Amino acid sequence: MTSQYLGWIESEIRKQKYGKAPASLYDPIRYIMSLGGKRLRPLLVLLAYGLYKNDVKKIVPLATAIEAFHNFTLLHDDIMDQAPLRRGKETVHEKWNVNTAILSGDVMLVKVYDQLLKSPQGSLKSVISKFNNCAAEVCEGQQWDMEFELMNTVSEEDYIKMIRQKTAVLLGFSLEFGAMLAKASNSDQKALRNFGIDIGIGFQLKDDWLDVYGNNENFGKQVGGDILSNKKTYLLIMALAKAKGKDKAELNRWLSSRARSSEKVKAVTAIYDKLGISDSTEEKINSYFSRGFAQLKKLKVAEHRKSPLYEFTLQLIDRIS
């Protein structure tokens, strides 16, 4: 089922024109949308809708609006991060220039609203209102993430709030959006939103854990990269809170070092091991996954209709393990 949904999503993305002239404004949009990715967000829209309705294909154009919004955020994030690559290809600001990337992102967001305005009239106001709340939170999360880079200490609570806003709320909205289009009950819409948020937080915490304890081949990027860049991940925040005496002094020494070596990765990982950071992080990850699946149990739909969403989520969790 998910492979069929993905085929519909890719076909719809290829059909969308976005705009014609000037080509230098619209080509970057077509370029970033063509780079692929998991298409997780529009897929969640379709899976949520499919809990209640069988005519899933008819909402594919609306689902792709969420993918366009996600890629809009990536386009602007890449500018802020000065990232040279996105999915193995040149980022838009590298392939064109920063000014073009900013303008293309701006018009991309306008096109998202054009797509969302095709929502059924009875739910349009609610869709736009909830999308606006979600979009604002995504921006807030990105700002917090940037500010954390300049702060000496970040609390666990603030970090969870940041990843909730930056990453998880859009997963939650994707599911809620599908339920809204299917005219599900308010309680089911809320449960699906909360499911997406909890699972999204779990995914991000898992990503933090894998950066230290993952397998290079399976993880898909350099293990230890967060340690080398002193990124304030959940693991580092926990280590800074738990470390005492010599452990704290050594951890701070490595954080003040600009060394980007395997020695630094091994030394910081050894401190994490001594403090039990891996186990406590895995406990936190599993607690969010459990909370998420508890939300699915609240849905007032037949159990067999929940299976595609439930099984897809389990596959995602297994894929990032």
Image (cartoon, rainbow, N blue to C red):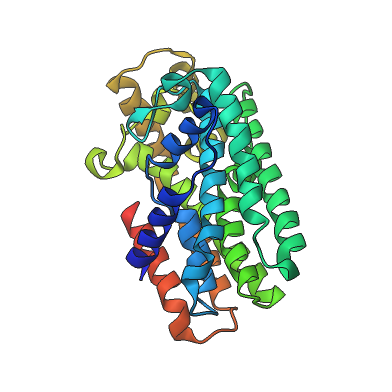
Q: Quadrant of the N terminus?
A: bottom left
Q: Is residue 95 above or below residue 145?
A: above
**Furthest residue toward bottom:** 302
Closest to the observer, 255 or 78:
78
Q: Quadrant of residue 277?
A: top left
**Furthest residue toward front:** 21
Q: Where does the image place residue 265, in percent across and percent down from the top left?
A: 34, 26
Residue drawn at x 70%, y 60% is: 127
Q: Quadrant of residue 49?
A: bottom right
Q: Where does the image place residue 234, in percent across and percent down from the top left?
A: 51, 40
**Furthest residue toward left:** 217
Q: Is residue 262 above or below residue 297?
A: above
Q: Where does the image place residue 280, in percent across and percent down from the top left?
A: 47, 49
146 vs 246, left or right, is: right
Q: Quadrant of residue 272?
A: top left
Closest to the observer, 257 or 207:
207
Closest to the observer, 207 or 258:
207
Q: Where does the image place residue 43, in percent across and percent down from the top left?
A: 46, 60
Closest to the observer, 204 or 35:
35
Residue 202 seen? yes
Q: Is residue 2 above or below residue 160?
A: below
Residue 283 seen? no
Q: How many numbered badges does the structure rendering display?
A: 0
Residue drawn at x 48%, y 72% is: 56
Residue drawn at x 49%, y 14% is: 256
Q: Is residue 153 above or below residue 121?
A: above
Residue drawn at x 65%, y 63% is: 119
